[in-house]
Amino acid sequence: MARYSADSREQVRDAIDMLDLVSARTELRRVGANSHQGLCPFHEERTPSFNVDPLKKVYHCFGCGAGGDAFRFVMETEGVDFPGALELLADRYGVTLEREQEDPAAAARRQRRERLLEVLARTAQYYARCLWEADEARHARTHLSERGLGEEVVRAFGVGYAPSAWDHMLVRWRRAGYSDQDLRDAGVAQRSARDGSLYDRFRGRLMFPLSDARGRVLGFGARRLSDSHPAKYINSPESELYQKRRRLFGADRARVEAARAGEVIVVEGYTDVLALHQAGLTATVGLMGTALAEEQMSELARLAPRVALALDADASGQEAMVRAARVAAARSLELRVVELPAGSDPADLVAAEGADAMRTRVQESVPFARFRAQRVLAGAELSSADGRDRALSELREVLAELAPSALREELVRMVAGRLGLSETLVASLGATPSSAGGVTTARSREPLDRREETERAFLALCIAVPEEGRRALASVDLERHFTGAMVRRAAAHLRTNLVDPLAGLGPEDGELSALLAELSLRATRLPADAGTLKVQALQLEAARLDREIAAARAGARLDVSQLATERVEVRAALDNAMEEAMEEG
């Protein structure tokens, strides 16, 4: 794991524009002097409960509890670790990172990875040059043109052409100083099984660079242009850099628009992705085949909460949709299907019908459950009781995956009408629904109990009025006044960080960061005055006494008179403080 200096981290933190960062995921509106609000990007909701403080650079959702600083936001939305988030933000805001001193082994691994990335980047650049400049790539340019793909989108995706000579790249990169091991590890060259000689892995093919979230080339997908090649597509070999199951073609270019639209469009092939981007549907990514791995579904979930499958309308494409639904079931993703005519793919449709027609098809996508029900009914033998029973058996799983909803009632009516059965019988199928197949389940947290609410409100008020807050925090006993370990840690941290509550936290402090972000945003919603803080401090003290009296009685201690006397005094002080606060407010 890369380790960067604390000074580098702070430079990145200072450079971040929090509104710019978060607005790529959800629309925000100002609701206070230092607060913006929008729909939470981490769970489904209709009423905004997601808050951002652009000055403190923190966020918190009061619906699901998600929260933290800018680094945590990128870790959650991009699916990266802390160093990855730091690197993404440094790239975005133009900050140069400085590394801490590394042990020799870690430094060697990092340098090795950087060298391989360098080989891949230079190879992608060279392939792109060959596509536009080499005479032998003329048929590759013709192929792209015949698919309706213009030069602008082809160049934007870095599409290239691999020269046909068996050692073209091998000779070139050896002269540039790269070793044979570099070229093998980068997947650019491979050894012959016959005699062990080294040769170019990709020859005479159209080349599609496969990149990570930062746009760094990790490998290639290569399409044949002649039937003389046995395989239509080949990919870079699996390696420390490239794992096909984790990659979606074009995800780095689709990320921003998918976040804004709340939807990502999924197609099968490379040219389908290019065709839809050229048509203005820039939230499109490719599977690089019909198989949809669980890791790819995780990547889709990071891009957007709604997935529109625009897979080829053949048997393999439809089976891929069924597999996708199974993988999506546990991920709270809304799965929809873009219906395509039999025998056509998205690139064909854009070429035949135009961009607007394809855009309309995407807008008219249907929930996966409806698509699957229609598919079962279309293939069923409805003229016999046995055929209808078989259809019912297949539809049981479809309906069982739907929670009670308008969609479920609609499908019940449709199935009952097609099969000539009562709606009551059809509705009884799958009586114990789970959330899947196009129905999303909002992530939410249990409401705070009175004790937790008292402790968090006190800490939030300390942030709201820091001068009085410092004195209030100094007067409490962390062990006796706070019942939870994380709230106790937050109180200890705030004793020296009230003005900048998230200062000094490291990547290992994710849970504490989330809590402090919540407290900071609570502070913007509370009356910022000493009187309210005094009331909350007395409520905290009263809660402590209530707990200690209860514990004394449970332990068969008869002498609780001192505690009871203290509670009476605190209650009286609390009543007076509340009256004073109401008069002032």
Image: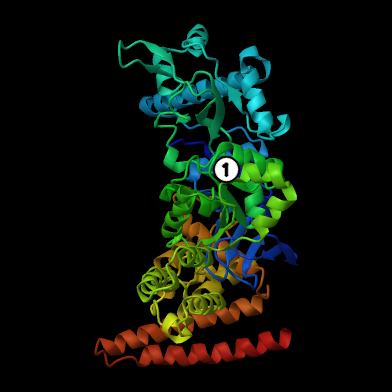
Q: Which quadrant would residue 249 be assigned to in this image? A: top right
- Residue 413 in the image, given as x and y percentages of width and height: 53, 79
Compared with residue 147, is residue 457 higher up or lower down, i.e. above or below? Answer: below
- Is the N terminus in the top left, top right, bottom left or bottom right quadrant? top left
Q: Which residue is mark 1?
A: 251
Camera-side residue: 410 or 253? 410
- Residue 579 in the image, given as x and y percentages of width and height: 65, 90
**What is the image's colouring?**
rainbow
Instruction: Give the residue type that dot 1 points to.
Output: Ala
Question: The residue tagged with tag 1: helix, strand or loop?
Answer: helix
Compared with residue 117, is residue 249 higher up or lower down, i.e. above or below? Answer: below
Number of numbered callouts drawn: 1
Camera-side residue: 481 or 227? 227
Residue 479 visible: no
Compared with residue 171, is residue 189 higher up or lower down, i.e. above or below? Answer: below
Residue reaching furthest front?
383
- Is the C terminus in the top left, top right, bottom left or bottom right quadrant? bottom right
- Residue 211 in the image, given as x and y percentages of width and height: 54, 35
- Residue 540 in the image, given as x and y percentages of width and height: 49, 79
**Residue at figure coordinates x 53%, y 19% from the top left:** 204
Camera-side residue: 99 or 29? 29
Pointer 1 local density, CA inside 10 Å: few below 14, some 14–19, many at least 20: many
Compared with residue 340, is residue 408 higher up or lower down, i.e. above or below? Answer: below
* Apparent side of residue 486 relative to residue 20 in the rendered image (left or right): left
Residue 521 visible: yes
